[in-house]
Image: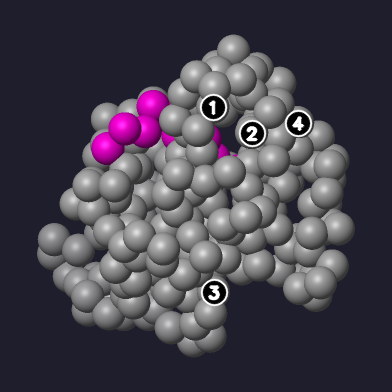
Amino acid sequence: MSPLSAILQVLFPTTCACCGEVLVRGERQVCLDCLANMATTAFSAMNDNPVERRLMGRIPLVHATSVYLFRQGNTVRNAVHAMKFHGNAELCLMMGRQMGLDLLSSGRFDDIDVLVPIPLHWLRRLTRGYNQSELLCRGIGEVLNVPVCTGAVVRHRYTRQQSLQQSHKRAENVEGAFKVKRADKLAGKHVLLVDDVLTTGATIAACADVIATVPGVRISVATFCMAI
Ligand SMILES: [Zn+2]
């Protein structure tokens, strides 16, 4: 593919970001088949769901959910790759809106005051061009009508990609990576912390740990998908 066609493909995609099939009229980014085949979890409406069990006891938590299931070779995995590594920002927004609809219909995330994406280190943000979790937040925010807050929490230490780390090294890798910069923006609020993939939960736990130091804050978590 020439550089020009690659740019045109991102701006005006003609093929599905997940399966590569040609999109037909009315389809955007992802074909209707892939959208219908994305493995949903139904966790959002469920108390004591597997995401809450994975995080409970490690961070003070109100509710937690992952909207989709990530498996090797499934459509959700392809969507994550397109969002993270293929520069598909529009897909992040679209998947954020899907998450928003799921959270809205669950009725358990109705009192969220602010959406906080897991921050990227500025260097990684620069090389990727955007923070995929921030774009997911923007999509969620459109549906829930809740503001997105960036800059209140920062990632001040550059860490290796969590996906390249062995499970037992992941907590160590992100320890001390986050810092609250603007506590006033989060104080007394119910924060929904948003990330793309939940694996061991080490990144979310490290970030939630620092947010929990803000007076009066309550924390819920939503990720696009959970790796099983
Ligand atoms: Zn498709």
Judging depth in this view, the residue of 58 and 117 nearest the camera is: 58
Return the x and y of residue 200 as percentages of the image width and height. 66, 67
Residue 227 circle label: 3
Callout 1 touching callout 2 (CB < 8 Å): yes
Q: Name the residue under label 4.
A: 179
Report whether residue 122 is seen.
no
**3 or 2: tag closer to the N-terminus:** 2
Say the numbered circle drawn on residue 212: 2
Beta carbon of the mark 1 residue lies under 8 A of ligand 1? no
Dot 1 or dot 2: first in sequence order is 2
Task: Give amino acid for label 4.
Answer: Lys
Number of marks in the image? 4
**Label 4: few (<14), some or many (≥20) within 10 Å?**
some
Which residues fall within the magenta stretch? 110-118
Looking at numbered disc 3 in the image, what kind of residue is underneath it? Ala
Residue furthest to the top: 184
CA gap between label 1 and label 3 equals 28 Å
Camera-side mark, 4 or 1: 1
- Foreground: disc 1 or disc 3: 1
Q: In the rendered view, does 120 fall on the left or right side of 112?
A: right
Three-letter amino acid code at the position of disc 2: Ala
Residue marked by disc 1: 217
Q: Where is residue 198 in the image (x, y as percent from the top left)?
A: 56, 63
Element marked by disc 4: strand
- Real-space Cα separation, disc 4 to disc 1, in angstroms: 15 Å
Q: Distance between the residues labelled 1 and 2?
A: 6 Å
